Image (cartoon, grey):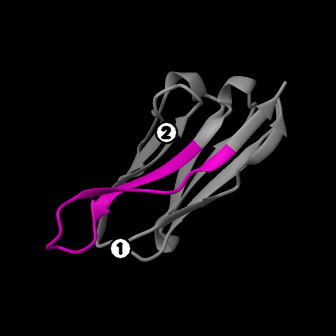
Amino acid sequence: QVQLVESGGGLVQAGGSLRLSCAASRRLFSINAMGWYRQAPGKQRELVAAINTGGTANYADFVKGRFTISRDSAKNTVYLQMNSLEPEDTAIYYCNYNGRQSPWNPREDYWGQGTQVTVSS
């Protein structure tokens, strides 16, 4: 089973920056997209940013211009650079890979365990 492990979360003051990383325990046969989601207390999980195999990224409106998603295909890793952080960005951030473990497996979503990001005012 593929496991995703996030790192890079923590406590930062408003206006500060953090860089999240997500690595897979082993290489997938194919990856359609990688993404970052977040869930704040009492709220539903929401998409923050995603990047497809062609390198095209899309962002939620609330992070445009502040966050940047990138990937290193050779390392099977996705990153989220977060700048100009605001208290409203406080949440647990989860990485997601959508892909196949093998040619015979269906496409699936894989999730990390989440990393806490706390932005103080």
Front-lying residue, 92 or 79: 92
Give residue 63's position: percent from left, percent from top.
59, 28
- Identify whether 19 is placed above or below 4: above
In the picture provided, is 59 more to the left or to the right than 31? Answer: right
Give residue 1's position: percent from left, percent from top.
35, 73
The residue under label 2 is which amino acid type? Answer: Ala
Residue 112: mark in rendering:
none
- Identify whether 90 is placed above or below 79: above
Residue 96 colored magenta? yes
Identify the residue shown where x is 54% and y is 35%.
39
- Identify whether 113 is placed above or below 36: below
Front-lying residue, 44 or 66: 44
Marks 1 and 2 sit apart, C-alpha to C-alpha, by: 24 Å
Residue under circle 2?
A: 49
Disc 1 vs disc 2: which is toward the camera? 1
Front-lying residue, 34 or 88: 88
Q: Secondary structure at mark 1?
A: loop
Q: Secondary structure at mark 2?
A: strand
Residue under circle 1?
A: 1
Identify the residue shown where x is 74% and y is 26%.
86
Q: Which residues lie in the magenta part?
A: 93-116
Give residue 102's position: percent from left, percent from top.
23, 75
